[in-house]
Amino acid sequence: MEKEDFTSIGICFSCGVRKRNGKDVLAWDTRARTDRAFILYKLGYISKILCTGGIFQKGQQVPIAELMKGYLTGKGVPKNDILIETRSVETVENIKFSLLLLKKRNILKNLKNAEQLRLVLISEPNHLRRIEIIARAYLERHKIGKFVPLLLDPVHYHISEKTRHEEDAMLYHTALDPLGEGEIFEKIRQERRQALGKRHGSR
């Protein structure tokens, strides 16, 4: 039988890190998203999991994508089926650096139809509204938008009213600046990196 070119990658978006006995561990919301990626993988709906997220919280020592990878390997996912992006500090960079990683791995190379690659975006529903806008904008920038179907896989859990209002505000800014190149997004990135005391590169 001829080998299929089709690849389905789940991009799992991080949320937060907590401390346990002085060590970084996944916050419950990040764990919920990672559990969903694991289920999709076990069901055969995705063939690889891309965990995205760097160091973006004060006191955090380990990139969150590395923690997500460790959690998934602990559940039996082979290391070869997990990709990690460890540079990003916010959602726009999650997508930008994830796509750059896929490009570097030649996964985005020579796409000729929508049956070669599918990206499944995994996050909380309100967050997914922004993620979809940003992802489509970056795929268009790479001139492969029409070749890469995006599927949204929402992870449902309770979020506070404050978080909901913050997501609504960011959705508005994202609609105006989907590539995150304006002053508002740059300010968020600078504030997060300054709070960490140094700029963390890729690993």
Image (tube, rainbow, N blue to C red):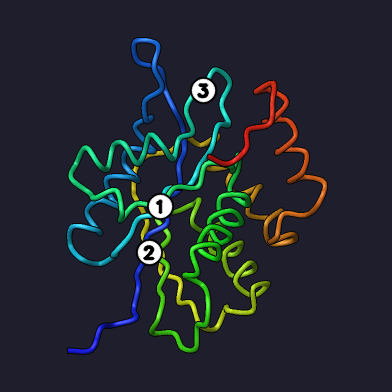
Horizontal side of residue 187 vs 15, given as left or right: right
**Which kind of residue does numbered mark 2 sit on?**
Ile
Horizontal side of residue 141 vs 99, given as left or right: right
Q: Are marks 1 and 3 in contact (CB under 8 Å)?
A: no
Horizontal side of residue 103 vs 72, given as left or right: right
**Which kind of residue does numbered mark 1 sit on?**
Leu
Cα distance in 3D space between marks 2 and 3: 27 Å
Find residue 57 and report its horizontal and vertical position in percent. Answer: 56, 26
Q: Are marks 2 and 3 in contact (CB under 8 Å)?
A: no
Res 166 seen here: no
Find residue 157 and report its horizontal and vertical position in percent. Answer: 34, 43
Which residue, given by chain and number where applicable, does mark 1 sit on? 83
Give the quadrant of residue 23. Answer: top left
Question: For the N terminus, which image quadrant?
Answer: bottom left
Residue at horizontal 30%, vertical 56%?
A: 81
Which residue, given by chain and number where applicable, does mark 2 sit on? 9
Residue at horizontal 53%, vertical 57%?
A: 101
Q: Are marks 2 and 1 in contact (CB under 8 Å)?
A: yes
Which residue, given by chain and number where applicable, does mark 3 sit on? 60
Find residue 92 and report its horizontal and vertical position in percent. Answer: 63, 52
Instruction: Say which element carries label 1.
Output: strand
Give the quadrant of residue 187. Answer: top right
Residues 65 and 110: in front is: 110
Determine which of the numbered discs, if any, sits on residue 74 in the image.
none
Establish if 112 lies above or below 200: below
Q: Nearer the viewer, mark 2 or mark 1?
A: 1
Establish if 126 lies above or below 20: below
Establish if 27 lies above or below 182: above
Mark sitting earlier along the chain (2/3): 2
Residue, far right: 183
Residues 166 and 113: in front is: 113
